[in-house]
Amino acid sequence: MDEYNKPMNLRRRGIYLLPNLFTTGALFAGFYAIVQAMNGRFEHAAVAIFIAMVLDGLDGRVARMTHTQSEFGAEYDSLSDMVSFGVAPSLVVYEWALKSLGKWGWFAAFIYCVATALRLARFNTNMDVVDKRYFQGLPSPAAAALVAGFVWVMLDSGFDGESLRWYAAVLTVFAGLNMVSNLPFYSFKTINMRKSVPFLVIFLIALFFVLISSDPPIVLFGLFLCYSLSGFALWAMRQRARS
């Protein structure tokens, strides 16, 4: 049950196999990213974080489709998210670029890590009172994709982490602070997957996948960078509407 799709009321206390298999897969991908970063295989680590994000996006949908939502699943998912989208990205970017900054490097990585924990805790306690159309702060999977995408695209372009250490530090801190901000980010929860759509929508979706396959590092990083900046645009629009 991912951060994007957790149900409002969780009353079942049982443990269901199918959705928790996806959660375990996401947890394994996050752990794998940490191991690969320790071995210096940063591209593998970045890809693993994106795989964790996909699996995390499936467990909630599977739970709802099979009516297997549970309190255990929600808690297990939060712990998995902390590893996959908190610890893993911070360690990957630290090993790749921030280590050479000394105490400033691990300080930047820790800001991101603790921000993820705070983001998840706030989400779990506020999910019954906030506007479901928007997230309060950048979702942790999107923040992880931003950091991992930066590592991936720079490696794919032939840059080494040490030469980009300050840029990596700024981006890491930016992602962390964005998570604990009050900026609104569109949640996409209002999209009805069961509603009929025009043929053009299906064609555009196909073009979207073609675009991603053409250059996954650049397209994915650009996509999540734009999303991380969208909160500022929504905030500015709201301020203008009030004035």
Image (tube, grey):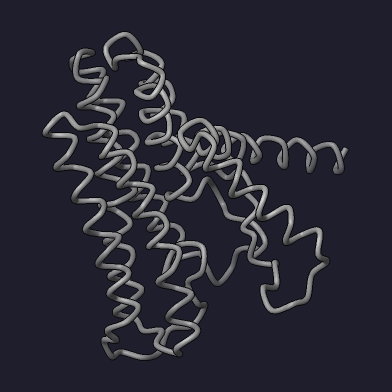
Residue nearer the viewer, 44 or 189: 44
Identify which residue is drawn at 48% across, 46% down: 142
Residue nearer the viewer, 236 or 214: 214
Rendering coords of residue 143 (x, y %): 45, 42
Rendering coords of residue 221 (x, y %): 50, 34
Which quadrant of the figure contains the C terminus? Answer: top right
Query: In the image, 192: left or right of 199?
Result: left
Identify which residue is drawn at 27% across, 12% down: 162
- Considering only vertical position in the picture, is 68 above or below 32? below
Query: In the image, 96: left or right of 223?
Result: left
Rendering coords of residue 1 (x, y %): 41, 71
- Considering only vertical position in the picture, is 75 above or below 54? below
Identify which residue is drawn at 32% across, 38% down: 46
Identify which residue is drawn at 18% across, 15% down: 102
- Considering only vertical position in the picture, is 158 above or below 12? above
Quadrant of the rendered structure where residue 88 is? top left
Q: How many marks?
A: 0
Query: In the image, 88: left or right of 125?
Result: left
Spot the residue most to the left: 39
Query: In the image, 147: left or right of 231?
Result: left
Rendering coords of residue 131 (x, y %): 65, 63
- Considering only vertical position in the picture, is 192 above or below 179? below
Quadrant of the rendered structure where residue 212 is? top right
Residue nearer the viewer, 56 or 10: 56
